[in-house]
Image: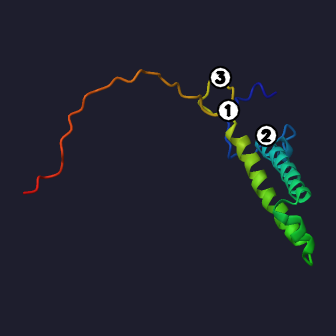
Amino acid sequence: MTADRPSAPYDPAAPQLSPAGGPTPLRHQPLLRLLFVNWLIGAGVALVLVVAVLVTDTAHLRSLMMASDQPWIPLFLLFFGFLVTMCSVAMATAVMLLPGDDESDGSGGGSAPATVETRTPVPVRVAVRSNTRRRR
């Protein structure tokens, strides 16, 4: 019997309710799902990069870590730095690629590229005066 009830305008501040009347689970929130999936992508890339750095012994990091009394601390710090960076990049890229409200075609990818007009340069004569005073 929802056809008799007029539909209210969408209010993002209002709590979202499921068809059963309870709150919507977080997995059904499209923005949170987008961010979580891209966080997982960033975490995977971070793990691959840490493994690549350790396998190739870039800047002798692996030998320095293994020479430490507690090698898990620098390993954790290296992984955490890559994790924060790669997850932030993946999530920010996903948000920036969302279609804007003002786009009519819905293709996504931000704003449309600006058109560049190509013109042939025309030389123009310019009168030049000296700003320096004559010394006597």
| Mark 1 → mark 2, Cα distance in angstroms | 18 Å
The residue beneath circle 2 is 30
Residue 110 position in % (x across, y down): 64, 34
Q: Report whether 12 appears left or right of 90.
A: left
Check whether the beta carbons of the residues at disc 3 and disc 2 lie within 8 A of each other.
Answer: no
Element under disc 1: loop
Q: Is residue 102 above or below residue 129?
A: above
Secondary element type, mark 3: loop
Give the distance between the C-alpha atoms of the residues marked 1 and 3, in whole angstroms: 11 Å
Nearest the eye: 112 or 20 = 112
Residue with the mark numbered 1? 109
Label 2 secondary element: helix
Rendered residue at 84%/44% (across/down) = 37
Asked if residue 28 shows in the view, the reply is yes
Instruction: Tell me what residue is drawn at x 84 percent, y 61 percent.
Output: 79
Residue type at mark 2 is Pro
* Residue highlighted by disc 3: 105
Tell me where residue 41 appears, x and y as whole percent: 84, 46
Q: In which quadrant is the N terminus drawn?
A: top right
- Residue 130 location (% of width, % of height): 18, 45
What's the amino acid at mark 1? Gly
